[in-house]
Image (spheres, rainbow, N blue to C red):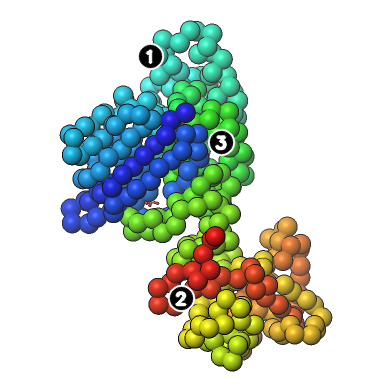
């Protein structure tokens, strides 16, 4: 197991700085996900670790080897960095069968024939392509080609795995299955893994730690639990969570938080604070009652969307619109009254000026 360390990494294309002074240490065996919107610099970062792109400044270390250092003039090419890669475009050799694509690198490593056969079999099983070994890439669907690329990586058993949106071409069901497969693979290989995605579900389900990136800058790094429950700023709060987090502005007045159509009690820690705060409430953290309850606030149902196991309920009170998430398949009439209550301990509060969380993860 090897550690990956990036120090002071800067990368520009022309005048645009796409990665800005990035410091990042990935522990041996850790599964780290870089999550962020399109164009934020995820692929560029991964390509620099792989050696497919040169940073303008900084140092990259894999294990105890410096593989890139601008100041010392060290630039190791990708093939000697000892990594396994899957990229957004996962090039398979078109003139080789699936089996050959998967075993090529193993033959180059001069592994025994029986070892190669065994690894091929395990890898094909994991991606559910046991019957496709003799096919050529042109005879496979996009999703199947992607799974061959994953199988090739599995068979290689590298100590460092770099994956760029490896599940992007798969349908929803297969993606869920492959997620389980990747998690199991990571557990078995114990490879230090950097995984790039813009899919928050993949990030939350797979990772030991998540980096949220925006415009080449780390907005937050933390465990999936912390990122979800204690977003460091409004960007992260809005980026993570589906359905989206509820945000509304409240003014601190007479020991309460006056949010216009809603009034919330003020947590003790803000008793001496004046001015405004932005309140953030996850849809599933707002309690719902179908009957009036003392102290709860009445709202009206607007739109109800049962998704099977859960139901998303859009409600409004005055001009304030809120999203609620309840478990179970729920049907309600438009306009029906509901009563809601906020659990103060589950709310986040943000400074409207700095957009920072006033109650950061401890
Ligand atoms: N070779 C290049 N020349 C010029 N600009 C580039 C080059 N490669 C990437 N960029 C720009 O750098 C920025 C970061 O690109 P990058 O591919 O790292 O984004 P990303 O986070 O992987 O996005 P996506 O989720 O869409 O894959 C983008 O604005 C992109 O247009
Ligand atoms: Mg990308």
The numbered mark at residue 149 is none
Query: Residue 209: x and y, percent?
Result: 51, 47
Foreground disc of the pair 3, 2: 2
**Residue 64 in sight in this render:** yes
Dots 3 and 2: beta carbons under 8 Å? no
Q: Is residue 186 left or right of residue 159?
A: right
Name above or below for residue 331 compared with residue 291.
above
Q: Quadrant of the C terminus?
A: bottom right
Q: Earlier in the sequence, mark 3 or mark 1?
A: 1
Regarding mark 1 in the picture, which secondary structure is present there?
Answer: helix
Nearest to the observer: residue 353 or residue 52: 353
Ligand 2 under 8 Å from disc 1 Cβ: no
The numbered mark at residue 351 is 2
Foreground disc of the pair 1, 2: 2
Residue farthest to the bottom, as pictured: 254
Residue drawn 41% across and 59% down?
219
Regarding mark 2 in the picture, which secondary structure is present there?
Answer: loop
Nearest to the observer: residue 90 or residue 257: 257
| Crowd around label 3: few <14 · some 14–19 · many ≥20 (10 Å) | some
Q: Is residue 63 left or right of residue 306?
A: left
Image quarter for residue 76?
Answer: top left
- Label 3 to label 1, Cα distance in Å? 25 Å
Residue drawn 58% across and 28% down?
188
Label 1 belongs to which residue? Answer: 108
Label 3 belongs to which residue? Answer: 182
Query: Residue 335: x and y, percent?
Result: 71, 84
Q: Earlier in the sequence, mark 3 or mark 2?
A: 3
Residue drawn 32% across and 50% down?
22
- Label 3 to label 2, Cα distance in Å? 39 Å
Residue farthest to the right, as pictured: 291
| Crowd around label 2: few <14 · some 14–19 · many ≥20 (10 Å) | some
């Amino acid at each position: 197991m090897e550690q990956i360390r990036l120090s002071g990494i800067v990368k520009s294309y022309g005048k645009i700085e796409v990665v800005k002074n990035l410091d990042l240490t990935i522990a041996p065996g850790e599964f780290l996900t870089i999550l962020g919107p399109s164009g934020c610099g995820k692929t560029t970062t991964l390509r620099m670790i792989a050696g497919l792109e040169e940073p303008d400044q900084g140092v990259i270390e894999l294990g105890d080897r410096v593989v890139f250092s601008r100041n010392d003039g060290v630039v190791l090419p990708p093939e000697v960095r000892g990594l396994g890669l899957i990229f957004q475009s996962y090039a398979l050799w078109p003139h080789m069968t699936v089996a050959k694509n998967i075993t090529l690198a193993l033959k180059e490593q001069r592994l025994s024939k029986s070892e190669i056969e065994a690894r091929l079999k395990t890898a094909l099983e994991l991606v559910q392509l046991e019957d496709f070994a003799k096919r050529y890439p042109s005879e496979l669907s996009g999703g199947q080609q992607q799974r061959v690329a994953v199988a090739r990586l599995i068979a290689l058993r590298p100590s460092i795995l770099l994956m760029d949106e490896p599940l992007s071409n798969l349908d929803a069901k297969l993606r869920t299955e492959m997620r389980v497969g990747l998690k199991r693979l990571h557990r078995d290989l114990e490879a230090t893994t950097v995984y790039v995605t813009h899919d928050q579900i993949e990030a939350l389900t797979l990772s030991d730690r998540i980096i949220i990136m925006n415009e080449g800058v780390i907005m937050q790094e933390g465990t999936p639990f912390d990122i979800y429950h204690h977003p460091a700023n409004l960007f992260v709060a809005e980026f993570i969570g589906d359905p989206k987090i509820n945000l509304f502005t409240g003014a601190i007045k007479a020991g309460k938080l006056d949010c216009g159509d809603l009034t919330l009690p003020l947590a003790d820690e803000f008793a001496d604070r004046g001015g405004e705060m932005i309140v953030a409430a996850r849809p599933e953290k707002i309690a719902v009652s179908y009957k009036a309850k003392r102290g709860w606030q009445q709202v009206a149902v607007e739109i109800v969307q049962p998704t099977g196991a859960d139901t998303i309920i859009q409600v409004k009170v005055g001009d304030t619109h809120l999203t609620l998430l309840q478990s179970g398949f729920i049907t309600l009439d438009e306009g029906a009254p509901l009563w809601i209550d906020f659990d103060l301990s589950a709310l986040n509060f943000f400074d409207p000026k700095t957009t920072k969380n006033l109650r950061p993860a401890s």
